[in-house]
Image (cartoon, rainbow, N blue to C red):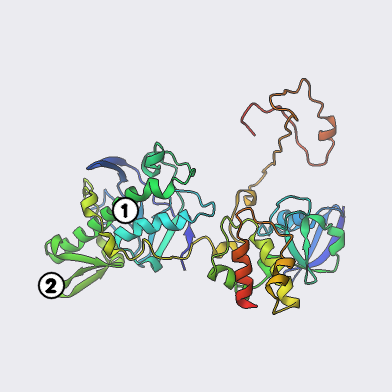
Amino acid sequence: MTTVAFTINGKPASVEADAETPLLWIVREHLKLTGTKFGCGAGLCGACTVHIDGKAVRSCQTQLSEVANKKVTTIEGLSPDSSHPLQKAWVAMQVPQCGYCQSGQIMQAAELLAKNPKPTREQIVAHMDGNICRCGTYSEIITAIQSIA
Amino acid sequence: MLQDTNALALSRRSFLVSTGAFSIAVAFGTRLDTATAAAPFNPNAWVTIGEDNIVTIVAPMVEMGQGVRTSLPLILAEDLDADWSRVRISATPDNDQVYGNPIFNNQLTTVGSFSVTGYYEKLRLAGAQARKILIANAATAWNVPASELTTEPGMVVHATSNRKISYGDIAKTATVPNPLPEVTKADLKPSSQFRLIGRDAGRIDVPSKVNGTAQYGIDVQLPGMLYASVLFPQVQDEKAEQIDNAAAKAVKGVVTSCRCRPASA
C-alpha cells in the first residue's frame, strides 16, 4: 500500500492503495466518480479515458503511482455545469444512445480540441480512432465535433 | 429541461376498466379517501400533478438508448395535453398488472422493440383519462357542462366565459371520481391535432450522458456490497468435477467462491 497525492478535477486528493491499482478503480471506487466507465480493462475500447495533465489516457492502463502530483481530469471535471462546447454539442446533436462510452468519447475529443481547435474531418477521425461505440454513434460524434471546430 | 425523478406515483388499489376492445389498468390516486384532495394529485396511476404545474409521468420501460423514457411519457402527455416543458419522468413502480406491456403479456420487460408499439394505446388512454378527470373537476368548480371545456397544454379552457385554469391549480382541490371514467379510442385526440407525437423532442437521458451523472448498473454502490465474477467452462455443458479455490481465496479482498447453478450469477 502506498499513499499518492494528486489533483482530481481541480481539487487535491490523497489515496491509499496498492501502487499498481489502475487509475480507473481509484477514480470509481475510492473517489466515487462513476462517470468514467469500465469497458474492456485492456486499453482497447476507450470507455475509461481521462486526462492526466491534459493528455487523454486510458485509466484502466494507468497505475496509481503514475499520477503522483499530476492533474487528473474526469468527465465530471470537464466543466462545472456541462457547459464545455463538446457537452453542449453532444446534447444539441443528441449523440449518445446507451451512452456508456460517451464519457470516454468526450474526454478523447476534448484533448483534440485543446491542442487543435480547428481539426479537419480526417484529423477528427484519426484522433477518435481508438474509442469504440457499440451503438455506432460515430457519425454523430464526428458531426458534433465538427459543429464546434 | 426535463428531468428524471424518483418520485413514484404509487397506488394502493388498482382495477381494470373496460375500454372497448382494449383494457387499461388504472389505479386510484393515493388521496381517494379524502373529500378534497391536496396537490400533488394523482388522477390515475400514471400521472402526478403538482401545484407548481409539474406533471410527473411514469415511464414504464428501461432506457437502453432507444429513447423510450422520453417517447413513452410523451405519448401519454399528448392525450393529457400536458405542457411538455413541465413534464418530469418517474421510475416504474414494481407492479406489472398496472404498468406492464400489453403486447408482452403485461410483463415489465424491456425487450424486442415492443415498447412503443406495445404501450402506444395504453398510454394514450391513460393520458386521455387523466385529462377527462381534470376537465370534470374544472366543470364542477365552474358549474358548467364538461362538454363546453377544452384543453391547451397544461390548461383547461372555457371559451364561452373566457376562463382558463392550469392543471396545477385544479390539482389543489381536485378529487378522483369513483369509479374512474371510462375512456375509449373515441376519447383520443385526432392525429391532426398532435402537438408532441411525431415531432422531435430532446431525449431526457442525453444531458446526464454527457457529464457522467447517468447511472448504469455498474455505478450502483451499496454498503457492504460484494462483486461476483463467473468463471465459465471452456466447452459448453462441461461441469467442474472439483474446485480448488485456494489460490482465489488468497487474493486480497476475495470473500468466497462457490459453484453456480445454471442461469444464476
> Left or right of B53: which side holds B138?
left
Q: Residue at x 68, y 72 (%)?
A: A121
- Residue type of the residue flagged with mark 2: Thr
Q: What chain is tagged by disc 1?
A: B
Give the residue at the far top of this rendering.
B241
Say whether disc 1 or disc 2 marks the residue closer to the N-terminus.
Answer: 1
- Residue type of the residue flagged with mark 1: Arg
Residue B95 percent coordinates (x, y): 41, 41
User: Which residue is denoted by mark 1 in the rendering?
Assistant: B124
Residue B8 percent coordinates (x, y): 43, 52
Distance in Å between CA atoms under marks 1 and 2: 28 Å
User: Which residue is denoted by mark 2 in the rendering?
Assistant: B160
- Quadrant in the picture for residue B233: top right
- Other-residue count near label 2 (Cα within 10 Å), few / some / many at <14 / 14–19 / ≥20: few
What element does badge 1 sit on? helix
What element does badge 2 sit on? helix
Residue A36 percent coordinates (x, y): 69, 59
Residue B148 percent coordinates (x, y): 14, 65
Q: Is residue A120 above or below residue B67?
A: below
Give the residue at the far bottom of this rendering.
A118
- Quadrant in the picture for residue A58: bottom right
Which is nearer the eye, A137 or B11? A137
- Other-residue count near label 1 (Cα within 10 Å), few / some / many at <14 / 14–19 / ≥20: many
Q: Nearer the viewer, mark 1 or mark 2?
A: 1
